[in-house]
Amino acid sequence: MVTALGAIAFHARIEAMIDPFGRHITYLRVSVTDRCDFRCIYCMAEDMTFLPKAELLSLEEMERLCAAFIRKGVRKLRLTGGEPLVRRNIMSLVHNLGQHLTSGDLDELALTTNGSQLAKYAAEIKAAGVRRINVSLDTLDEAKFRAITRWGRLPQVMEGLAAAKAAGLHVKINTVALKGINDGEFDRLIDWCGAEGFDLTLIETMPMGDIDGDRTDQYLPLSLVRARLQSRWTLEESDYRSGGPARYAQVRETGGRLGFITPLTHNFCESCNRVRVTCTGTLFMCLGQDDAADLRTPLRASDDDTLLENAIDKAIGRKPKGHDFIIDRRVNRPAVSRHMSVTGG
Ligand code: SAM
Ligand code: SF4
């Protein structure tokens, strides 16, 4: 016989996701497509092969998957990609997920985008309940922007950013620190973000997926960047956390926040609260490890979510302690074979 107390305990076990290291999983990142309208040099090769469309979860399946995670304790959900805003009908998913904000089941719905489609969608995104978006922008120089993104146009992103600002979205700019490419521009970016009211986060390149070139040439340790920035700016320690891995400082001169994501120089795994699901329904328990769980099969096997929830529980039960990214010139291959565009960062 199940006692009332036993039933509560059983219920709690079904609901919460706690990994073997006691970390509560409350943050889900969903890559809604592996496709993109840019080809950033650190992220993709120019002639990428994308997944056949038949392999993708439908938007309805993604919604069902997200709802299962929300029932199991996810409070923050981020849509990413590839470029999430190039997926056809993406706004229907954004809108439907926004309903979980209204019901109070979700605290935050966020988005990471390259900004190319924001002029079209910013107002709708805001109306769906999204408050904060991350926009990737590595340079303010038009020619350099073209060189980094290969296919992108800076004015289009600037237009998108203006639309986001006008819609009242809080914008954080994500800048990947690239040695010899944008390392002379961080002061300008800090200044510009301060003036625009945007936060800024600098990211170290991570060794994920084959690109056309040697990643060790791009790698710039942020410890070095930070030391350099401190000679020009007053960086005050901040205990602000966005729910992600960035550590923040407050720039006294601009009043803006400056974040650092340093997977290589600082291991941020001890406080990891997140997992990632790809557009094919593959769950990655760690960005820096290859182990994954197939959620598409249990999702499609029945209309009831029991199989799906069991598969999620099993996967969380083997979330690893951390990643072991290493950029090493002697081993000329990425630490993780999949591209960042598969799991969306
Ligand atoms: N397309 C969207 C964008 O660019 O924001 C979302 C997906 S993109 C893969 C997410 C983030 O990952 C971007 O900020 C991008 O700069 C970053 N990124 C991609 N490849 C990376 C790598 N190898 N190392 C570090 N960051 C990377
Ligand atoms: Fe596309 Fe984002 Fe990767 Fe650039 S970083 S190629 S915009 S997915």
Image (cartoon, grey):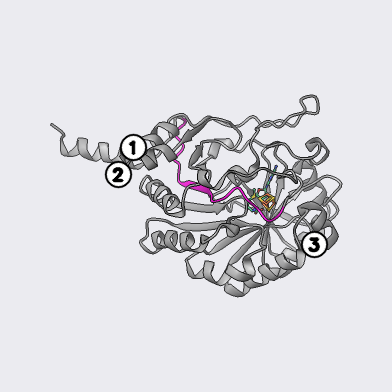
Tag of residue 140: 3
- SS at mark 1 in the image: helix
Q: How far apart are marks 2 and 1 (CA)?
A: 7 Å
Dividing the image into 4 quarters, which one contains the C terminus? Answer: top right
**Looking at the picture, how far across and down is residue 47, in whole percent?**
73, 45
Number of numbered markers: 3
Q: Provide residue 245's location: percent of width, then percent of height.
A: 60, 45
For disc 1, does the CB lie below 8 Å from ligand 1?
no
Q: Is residue 22 magenta?
A: yes
Q: Answer whether residue 68 is visible to the viewer in this image.
A: yes
Position of 273 relative to 131 (above/below): above
Q: Residue 214's image quarter?
A: top right
Q: Dividing the picture into quarters, in which one does residue 51 lie? A: top right
Q: Do the residues labelled 2 and 1 touch (CB within 8 Å)?
A: yes
Instruction: First in sequence, mark 3 or 1: give its number.
Output: 3
Q: Is 324 on the left-hand or right-hand side of 176?
A: left
For numbered disc 3, what is the local secondary structure? Answer: loop
**Which residue corresponds to mark 2?**
304
> Which residue is label 1 attached to?
307
- Residue at image position (76%, 68%) is 155
Residue 230 appearing in the image: no
The residue carrying pointer 3 sits among few (fewer than 14), some (14 to 19) or many (20 or more) residues within 10 Å by Cα, namely some
* Element on which disc 2 rests: loop
Q: In this picture, is 10 found above or below 56?
A: above
Which residue type carries mark 1?
A: Leu
In the image as oriented, which residue stretches furthest toward the left? Answer: 1
In this picture, is 223 found above or below 76?
Answer: above
Horizontal side, residue 216 vs residue 323: left or right: right
Cα gap from disc 3 to disc 1, whole angstroms:
48 Å
